[in-house]
Amino acid sequence: MIARELIGTAQVPDGEELRLFRHGGDFMIVLDRNELMSTRMRGSEEALAVMSCARIAGATQPRMLIGGYGMGFTLRAALANLPDDAQVTVAEIVPEIIAWARGPMAEVAAGCLDDRRVRLVQGDVVDVIAGSAGGFDAILLDVDNGPDGLVRAGNDRLYAKAGLRTAARALRPGGVLAIWSAARDEAFTRRLKAAGFAVDEVTVYARYDKQGNGKGAKHVIWFAKLDAERRGKTL
C-alpha cells in the first residue's frame, strides 16, 4: 500500500490551514478532514469553465475572471475553449497554491499559468471584482466548498446580496456569473434571483470517464445572468 505523503501546508488568510498531499501519482488539497480538491476528481471544475465559455461564445475579445486557481482544472479548460484574443484573470489569495502549481504540481499545471492570455493576481477575488466595473464577460467562482465560507469566512462577502450586486456591476452586458458548489443550496438560489439574476442551476458529476459518463459525487453550478431590463433595475 502506498502511503499518503504530506508535501506542503498553507495558511488561508483569516481561515484554516490547507495541506497538500501526494498519493502515488495523485495530489489532493485537504482542509481539516475535508478533501477540497483532487487530481482524481476534476469533472465539475472543468465543466465550470466549459459551460461558461459556451454561454459567452458570442463575446468579442472575451474577458474572464476565475476566482481560485485550485489545481488549475478550470483555467486549463477555459484556455482550451477560449479564442486567442481572450484574456483570463486568475485571482488566488493563497500564495502557496501558486507555488505548488509551479513546483511539485508543475506537470499537472502543464504551463497554463504561462499562457499569454493569463493574468495572475495574487490577492482576494472580492477586491478584483469590486475594482472591475463592466470588466468581464464571465466571472467564475470556485473559492470555497459552496456559498457558505467553509475555507475562509471572508468568502461570505461574495455570496451575500451586496456581493452579488457588486459582481453584477463587474459584468459586461450579457455576461454570466458562474458559481461552483459541492451541494445544492436553495436559499442561495433565491438570493441570486433577489439580486436580479436569471438563474440556471446545473448538476454535474465530480468526474467523467473517457466515454463522457458521469462518476462519483454530484456537484452544482449556478449560472446567473442579467438581461437588459433586470440589469438596469439592479445596477
Image (cartoon, grey):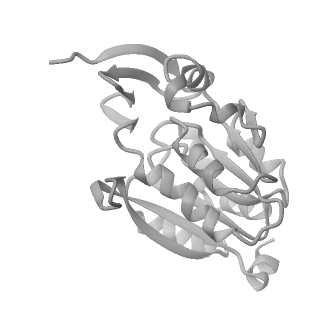
Image position, residue 210 (x, y; %): 34, 54
Q: In the image, what residue occupies the spot 64% across and 31% down?
A: 93
Q: Is residue 67 left or right of residue 228?
A: left
Q: In the image, what residue occupies the spot 50% across and 23% down?
A: 105
Q: Is residue 39 left or right of residue 226?
A: left
Q: In the image, what residue occupies the spot 57% across and 32% down?
A: 110
Image position, residue 143 (x, y; %): 55, 43
Does the rendering let one see residue 1? yes
- Residue 143's place in the image compared with 166, above or below, is above
Q: Quadrant of residue 67?
A: top right
Q: Of 110 and 188, which appears nearest the observer?
A: 110
Q: Of 138 and 186, which appears nearest the observer?
A: 138
Q: Of 177 and 194, which appears nearest the observer?
A: 177
Q: Residue furthest left?
A: 1
Indicate the quadrant containing the N terminus: top left, top right, bottom left or bottom right.
top left
Q: Residue furthest bottom?
A: 229
Q: In the image, what residue occupies the spot 36% across and 44% down?
A: 41
Does the rendering let one see residue 147? no
- Residue 180's place in the image compared with 10, above or below, is below
Q: Residue furthest front?
A: 211
Q: Is residue 117 left or right of residue 51?
A: right
How many numbered dots are placed on residues in this image?
0
Image position, residue 161 (x, y; %): 64, 62
Indicate the quadrant containing the C terminus: top left, top right, bottom left or bottom right.
bottom right
Image position, residue 188 (x, y; %): 50, 64
Q: Of 85 and 93, which appears nearest the observer?
A: 85
- Residue 91's place in the image compared with 85, above or below, is above
Q: Quadrant of residue 212?
A: bottom left
